[in-house]
Image: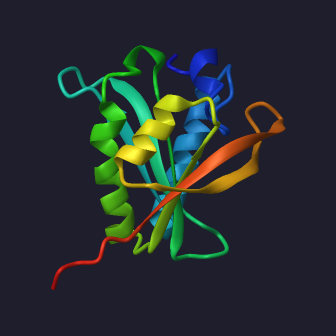
Amino acid sequence: MMMTPEVSRWVAYWPFPFTYEMAVARIEAARDWARRGDALPFAATDKASGDLIGWVMIYRDEENHRRGSLGYWFGEKHHGKGYMRELAPVALAAGFDLLDLDVIEAAAQPANAASIAVMRACGMKPTGEGMVYAPARGRHELCQFYEVQRPHSLA
């Protein structure tokens, strides 16, 4: 199982323990959102082995369909290897193109320096702080928000 307490502490919607049944339900829900055009789920895999190493998803805001959010996690042994810095620009471009979003945001707890570095590396700009409900821990937590706007093409 890739979901560990060290990973779960940083993500709002992925509790530990995370059971097989929970994984199946999460995958089915993500497929439904994708079929409706409301999300782009990505299973991140190791290029050499094909093993699952993480999860990335861009999902449409329910109230403003031109905005989306980026969520992600990688297994603990895959932290610090640059996987998200490689995948984030691809996921963001797909969100703008395939979901036709104008803005994509992401959030991280202030102590999650690695996620904040990834967001900044993707060109996301800070937009403020706010409380986010984290069902994984059953509480509200302070997060820093970042966003990036759809790039303007040079036509």
| Residue drawn at (64%, 16%) of the image | 5
**Which residue appears farthest toward the right when viewing the image?**
139
- Place of residue 119 in the rendered image (x, y in percent of width and height, measured from the top left): 44, 46
Decide: is 91 above or below 4. below
Could you tell whether 43 is left or right of 127 in the image? left
Residue 73 vertical position relative to residue 123 in the rendered view, above or below: above
Q: Is residue 73 visible?
A: no
Q: With 125 as the anchor, is 42 left or right in this view?
A: left
Quarter of the image for residue 8 reads top right
**How many numbered discs?**
0
Asked if residue 87 lies left or right of residue 2, the reply is left
Residue pictured at 15% horizontal, 85% vertical: 155
What colour scheme governs how the chains and residues are painted in the rendered image of this protein? rainbow
Question: Nearest the camera: 146 or 30?
Answer: 146
Residue 154 can be seen in this image? yes
- Position in image of residue 107 (x %, y %): 59, 47
**Side of 141 relative to 7 (left or right):** right
Residue 45's place in the image compared with 116, above or below, is above
Instruction: Give me the residue at 54% from left, 47% from top.
Output: 28
Q: Nearer the viewer, residue 111 or 134?
A: 111
- What is the x, y in percent for residue 16? 68, 21
Between 74 and 48, the one lying in front of the other is 74
> Where does residue 147 sit, x and y in percent of width and height?
50, 59
Which residue, as the protein is rendered here, is positioned at the far bottom?
155
Residue drawn at (36%, 57%), measured in percent from left and top? 92
Relative vertical location of residue 59 with respect to residue 22 in this rendering, above or below: below
